[in-house]
């Protein structure tokens, strides 16, 4: 089972391209579900289906659905939130504080993502294509499982032992059943978060396809997104440059022809500078809006030609982190390479936090767990090259075994 996530800056056409990709996969014999987590609810419009709710067949082997995040919150989160408030109140937290502490940011997006993977696991589909929200929302969505898992662990460490033991004892024997129910709810949430993290980080199951238009502002955001996803350990298997205007070089002297020729030249210059580390596909700016499965299949033919929309991602065997050592003892030099695409203008900050490195790129931070040997070393330098970030270390005499 494959999950393919489409995202991009708002208005670049990601919904249409996600629907076209799903239609193509179904047409070549793969049972496919295309589902939207975008609150804009435009997937049905692209498919020519008036109203999408539960997954339903909209073509031969093609199914479509819309995730209702608000309904998921009402059905799943409210009960768990009640359990959390009970635990906090039993631990001596004031009622108002308990109310605030149980409002987890992004819970709607988290439940929507969990629902996607549950549909993928439970349904008959070989491929699930996801029309995600705009880039910023998607980056937050994909970071939520790890962030909320950390929040939950700090709030209720070692869930079963602490909740069932310590808090149940504080509550008294008459309320043990309530604490057990709360502990079970917390454990289920923790297991779901762990499962989501593993699914997102598995390149054989989950990849992201970025959609952009050949404009400098949009391409700049796409570059930053490539870096952010790489740091989260989520593989991008391609970029689609949408709405490339026709080539009108020598096509006439009218104002319209000159405008199109100039616009095309600007777009080509932007794409020539872009050069992402993944496959770049291009799609022309269509005269008519592609609505309905037949029109989407025509678009997919231009996008993929005779190729496989699920071709193996380029560089699938590359490791995000690698360590190189030269020298011996206290004179040794260790180099940690973080293989992420970093543009020349990358705003980068690096800090050591215990056994981890806090790497911030363009305002987005990720924690890198250091290998055991580097935990006994001090950072000496860092530089950016064509392969990513190279960080130098040398042994710390206070920590290095003699």
Image: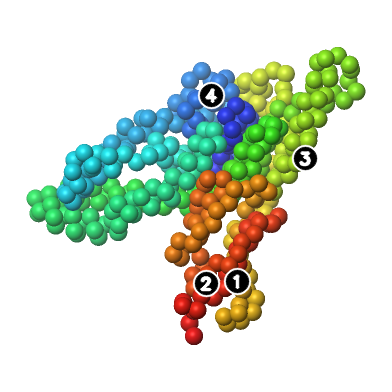
Select label 4 or label 2 by which is in front. Answer: 2
Given contact means CB atoms under 8 Å apart, are the residues at marks 3 and 2 in contact?
Answer: no
Nearest to N terminus: mark 1 or mark 3: 3
Instruction: Please report contact status of discs 4 and 3: CB closer than 8 Å, yes or no.
Output: no
Task: Name the residue tied to disc 1.
Answer: 334
Residue marked by disc 4: 42
Q: Is residue 317 above or below residue 247?
A: below
Q: Nearer the viewer, mark 1 or mark 4?
A: 1
Q: Residue furthest bottom?
A: 402
Q: Which residue is the site of mark 3?
A: 272
Tag 2 or tag 3, which sits nearer the N-term?
Answer: 3
Q: Secondary structure at mark 4?
A: loop
Circle nearer the viewer, 4 or 3: 3
Q: Residue at x 56, y 39 (%)?
A: 5
What whole-number distance in Å separates the C-alpha atoms at marks 4 and 3? 31 Å
The answer to whether the residues at label 1 and label 2 have Cβ atoms under 8 Å apart is yes
Residue that label 2 marks: 377
Return the x and y of residue 173 as percentages of the image width and height: 9, 54
Q: Of discs 3 and 2, which sits in the foreground?
A: 2
Front residue of 76/346: it is: 346
Q: Identify the mark nearer the N-term, 1 or 2.
A: 1
Label located before the other in sequence (4 or 3): 4
Mark 3: secondary structure: helix
Which residue occupies the foreground of this view, 267 or 83? 267
- Name which quarter of the figure residue 69 lies in: top left
Measured Cα–Cα span from mark 1 to mark 4: 50 Å
Q: Earlier in the sequence, mark 1 or mark 4?
A: 4
Left or right: 141 in relation to 251: left
């Amino acid at each position: 089972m494959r999950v393919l996530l489409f995202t991009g800056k708002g208005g670049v056409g990601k919904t249409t391209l996600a629907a076209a990709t799903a239609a193509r996969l179904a047409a070549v014999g793969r049972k496919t579900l295309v589902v939207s987590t975008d609150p804009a609810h435009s997937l049905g419009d692209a498919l020519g289906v008036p109203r999408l709710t539960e997954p339903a067949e909209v073509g031969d082997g093609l199914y479509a659905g819309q995730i209702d995040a608000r309904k998921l919150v009402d059905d799943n989160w409210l009960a768990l939130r009640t359990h959390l408030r009970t635990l906090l109140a039993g631990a001596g937290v004031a009622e108002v504080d308990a109310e605030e502490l149980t409002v987890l940011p992004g819970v709607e997006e988290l439940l929507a993502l969990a629902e996607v993977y549950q549909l993928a696991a439970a349904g008959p589909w070989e491929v699930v294509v996801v029309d995600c929200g705009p880039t910023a929302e998607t980056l937050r969505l994909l970071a939520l499982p790890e962030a909320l898992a950390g929040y939950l662990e700090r709030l209720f460490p070692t869930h079963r032992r602490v909740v069932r033991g310590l808090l149940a004892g504080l509550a008294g024997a008459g309320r043990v059943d309530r604490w057990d129910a709360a502990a079970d709810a917390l454990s289920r949430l923790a297991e779901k978060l762990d499962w989501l993290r593993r699914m997102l980080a598995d390149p054989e199951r989950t990849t992201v396809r970025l959609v952009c238009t050949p404009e400098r502002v949009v391409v700049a955001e796409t570059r930053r997104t490539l870096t952010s996803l790489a740091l989260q350990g989520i593989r991008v298997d391609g970029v689609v440059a949408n709405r490339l205007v026709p080539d009108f070089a020598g096509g006439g002297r009218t104002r319209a022809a000159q405008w199109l020729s100039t616009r095309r030249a600007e777009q080509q210059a932007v794409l020539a500078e872009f050069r992402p580390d993944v496959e770049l596909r291009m799609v022309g700016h269509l005269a008519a809006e592609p609505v309905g499965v037949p029109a989407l299949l025509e678009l997919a033919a231009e996008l993929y030609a005779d190729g496989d929309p699920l071709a193996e991602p380029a560089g699938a065997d590359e490791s995000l982190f690698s360590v190189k050592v030269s020298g011996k003892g206290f004179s040794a030099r260790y180099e940690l390479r973080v293989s992420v695409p970093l543009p020349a203008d990358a705003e980068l900050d690096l800090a050591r936090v215990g056994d981890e490195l806090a790497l911030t790129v363009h305002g987005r931070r990720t924690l890198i767990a250091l290998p055991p040997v580097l935990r006994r070393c001090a950072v000496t330098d860092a530089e950016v090259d064509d392969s990513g970030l190279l960080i130098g270390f040398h042994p710390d005499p206070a920590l290095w075994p003699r």
